[in-house]
Image (cartoon, grey):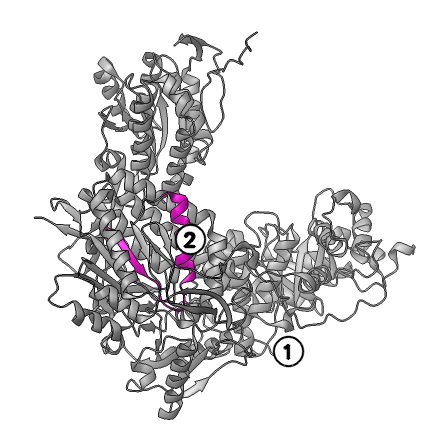
Amino acid sequence: MSELDRPPGATPAAPRDWTYAPAPESRDVVRIAERYGHFVGGQWLEAAETYETISPSSEEPLALVGQGTEQDVDAAVGAARSAFANGWSALPGSERAKYLFRIARILQERSRELAVLESLNGGKPIKESRDVDLPLAAAHFFYYAGWADKLEYAFANRRPRPVGVAGQIIPWNFPLLMLAWKIAPALAAGNTVVLKPSHTTPLTALLFCDVLRQAELPPGVVNIVTGYGSTGAALVKHKDVDKIAFTGSTEVGKWIQSEVAGSGKRLTLELGGKAANIVFDDCALDQAVEGIVNGIYFNQGEVCCAGSRLFVQESIYEPLIAKLKRRLATLRVGDPLDKNTDVGAINSREQLEKIASLVQSGVDEGAEIYQPPCRLPEKGFWFAPTVFTNVAQSYRIAQEEIFGPVLSVLTFRTPEEAVEKANNTPYGLSAGVWTEKGSRILWMAQRLRAGVVWANTFNRFDPTSPFGGYKESGFGREGGRHGLEGYLRFDE
Amino acid sequence: MSRLPVKKTYKLYIGGAFPRSESGRTYEAEGQNVARASRKDARDAVRAARAAQPGWAAATAYNRGQVLYRLAEMVEARVPEFAELCSGHGEVEQAIDRIVWYAGWADKLPQVLGGANPVAGPYFNFTIPEPTGVVAVLAPDEPPLLGLVTRLLPPLVGGNAVVAVASESRPLAAVELAEAVATSDLPGGVVNLLTGFRKELAPILASHMDVNALDVCGADGDTPELERLAAENVKRVVHGRADVQSPWEIASFLELKTVWHPIGQ
Amino acid sequence: MAQAPALPTGFELPLEPRLPRIGAVDAVALEERAASLAKRSIKKDAKVFALELAIRTTDLTTLEGADTPGKVAALSSKAIRPDPSDPGIPSCAAICVYPNLVPAARERLRGTGVKVAAVATAFPSGQYPTAIKVADVRSAVELGADEIDMVIDRGAFLSGRYAKVYDEIVQVKEACGDVHLKVILETGELGTYDNVRRATLLAIAGGADFVKTSTGKINPAATLPVALCMLEAVRDVHEETGRRIGFKVAGGIRQAKQAVQHLVLVHETLGPDWLTPDLYRLGASSLLNDILMQLRKGKTGVYQSPDYFTLD
């Protein structure tokens, strides 16, 4: 036997444990300024008052941003009104379209930069901001660009016209995507806007202003004022705003609705939810487990349409729960900028405390808690993926929106019972149905009082697909042809 | 001493490539030798279109919209060249804006042309538009660029593949457009362009059993004969106009499929 | 090792909990999950671990009409020592050849720990009478194969004759004796993931030690979604019965990156216990050199050329 044939000693026994090495996405791609002002009339206005925005995964300060005052809001509304009156609304739709197409393309080109910033400032995994938030944001602008010069086809015989100046207040869970959902249809319809990002996640909105500069959008068409709730309140109360669009908590939504009552202001609200995710015994089981996991742990469960109430048909309960718990153990919780992270940081200390408090209530009320073993970092705001079983319909964890990675599991026996329990809530944003039987999907969809029904999938979004709630989850739709309606007036 | 420019060769555009006519023939138009397509070239073009169409139809509507928007980008980058081959900058800008207009329809068609139908029974019933397949287009002589764009975009947006016969007297703008198409991310075979004698090529396409629709915009007086030939495989015959912009133009090249499914436990 | 009971006729869902429910597979969600796992970023020592594991679990394969003892001897040497310039690189798990070449492989591999796997049952089509296919297996075993890779009868499967498919596996297993049996489903011919799941459970019920995706002779072969589908069935068998069945992917895996993606699938579906040649194999030929190139790039920091790695 030649030298080459001699075996290289006993091949060592394969070490079984395979740990993935850190795979961080580089922060170099984005440059964050030390300090930002407000973007008004195409210019940066120095902010008189500022506050610090941080990275929730490490509590590292990222920048100083403006705390918008009533004066700042007033200047922004003025700029929006001026832009509306002096050209934007009179611009042919095909020209407005081309600005929006430009914005869409630039978002695609600067996608990585914005995704990294989104993960850094908000806590969500880079895998999500890169593969979901950014592509959808660009797609939203692309879709609505195409409507800008086709409004008469969208609303035949109704003479659609813009409403004027829209005040838009968005949440922290999908900062840039929510910005796209608001600005794209508003501009396509010929309006100008003042947008207030959530106070914990202002940075992608501020970087978006540079996208607007590159797109050469006329000054004043989009204005961005940052700040806490008081800034939003000033916008809601401002007399020269024609329409308010709000996405956020039901509590604040109700305040806004009562505040604009009698003012003639148009209003759309996209509020909270407590979605029922309903699994039948004839589902494709492993895929249903993936769907459940995606439904409540995607974006750390900080999603208005999260599938937070899992209804399992009793006949499949044991195997499903066993698979679910095993699957939870493979979720990777960690640095949002690591490409292998599945679950990122909770957005703020405030939110973390809310989640912890509700989870404690679940334990106190008698539900059984399960959390996979999880090494959470010391700094930053973290919560392990959690499942509660033995949950009663009346427990706080089954009634109140937690907005975190916490799933409550209940059971049912028949489709009727599932529908009844699913609808037994003041909310009505979304629902999920898992069964291989087509007729049952349609039967359930017909009866579920929810604005979005996902069958054999969950958390799927598309700019062509209208999204919005029933009941206390709000009114109005975003996405699709219907998404234009809130931004138009119709002279019959 | 002035520099001698390199003269362009005006070839056909089939299957993403620029072949000469298999017949080797050319004819003179606008002072240039332009490929004179034969029946075999037409046959090859239809074959290329048929091969490419399923992939184009299977792309997401969003993707088709983006690709067509990129076609607009490519034409915009060649405005001076195009302007010399038609009535001028104005026509080119209109053509670009028309491409953008149609590109924006790609992801909206079912929302306007289709929908759920409220049948009187426990059934979910919906109608969706689908591309008809391979469309032959006879481009008008005027306007040389805008006319071709006006007839080309509607079938494309809907997911069809096209074999277009350029204007016989003004073919150069069409060849330039083919070059823009070739750099636009449109897959090879989705758009095919034949230059040559319309009286030779139109009947071949009108009678071809694997062409699903025929746009007779540039047919002039030959329309009745072409309509007769089209009847053999029940082609959809569209009397396209040279300067029009409407979603109903797109609808002319779409089939409608209605699906039923019971609603029950 | 626990024996699964014979399947009831008609392949109906058994009411006793000794086999997992057959159930359905949602194609869209399965493909999404596979795509999501394929995005894992495996770098540095995690990548080296994976690449070395891939080599260690490779069944280096040649299945051509033109195979000769000389060709097989050369391939065997490659399997023993894939990179002569780097003795730290482990040997492959096995050589995979047609029965006639088993003696030549055995000769070269004697004393090395690298196994000889033979394809049998009228590989790749399986379109022959059962008796012939079983005789094929017996003769391969007599020639000295350590492992047998059989094909299921796809014609019988697709025409609903599941009992025939099952009976053949049982008979082949019997003819194998102590020799380890891999059952090839030829997933590219089965049409749907529902069928892939069904065939996987059927093969395991029939006595497979390993289930294998493909013959490598047609496309599509070992795609990530198909592998995931089979891994989920293997997982269900383990959960229900405690049996650990092995899994082999074969066909179309030419790049190191794909091999790593496949290993991620195993790791995140079955866990680290399956990351061993006793329970996982990768059937490939040109893959080996791509892995060697990746390993050398890792060590040197520069992109490699195929010229520096032997073709055997």
Could you say which quadrant of the image residue C280 lies in?
bottom right
Disc 1, SS: loop
Q: Which amino acid does label 1 sit on?
A: Met
Point out the residue furthest to the left here. A492
Residue C32 seen in the current view:
no
Q: What residue type is labelled 2?
A: Pro
Q: What label sits on residue A265 in the rendered view?
A: none
- Quarter of the picture containing the C terminus of chain B is bottom left
User: Which class describes the residues within 10 Å of circle 2: few (<14), some (14-19), or many (20+)?
Assistant: some
State the residue in front, B197 or B78: B78
Q: Give the range drawn in magenta.
A: A191-216
Q: Residue at x 23, y 27 (%)?
A: B238
Residue A51 in the image: above or below residue C89: below
State the residue in front, A389 or C251: A389
Q: What label sits on residue C1 in the rendered view?
A: 1
Residue A158 in the image: above or below residue A396: above
Label 1 near label 2: C-beta < 8 Å?
no
Return the x and y of residue C128 as percentages of the image width and height. Answer: 59, 51
State yes or no: residue A212 in magenta: yes
Give the number of callouts.
2
Q: Which of marks 2 and 1 is in front?
A: 2
Return the x and y of residue B109 as percentages of the image width and height. Answer: 26, 44
Q: Which residue is drawn at 61% across and 73% down?
A: C244
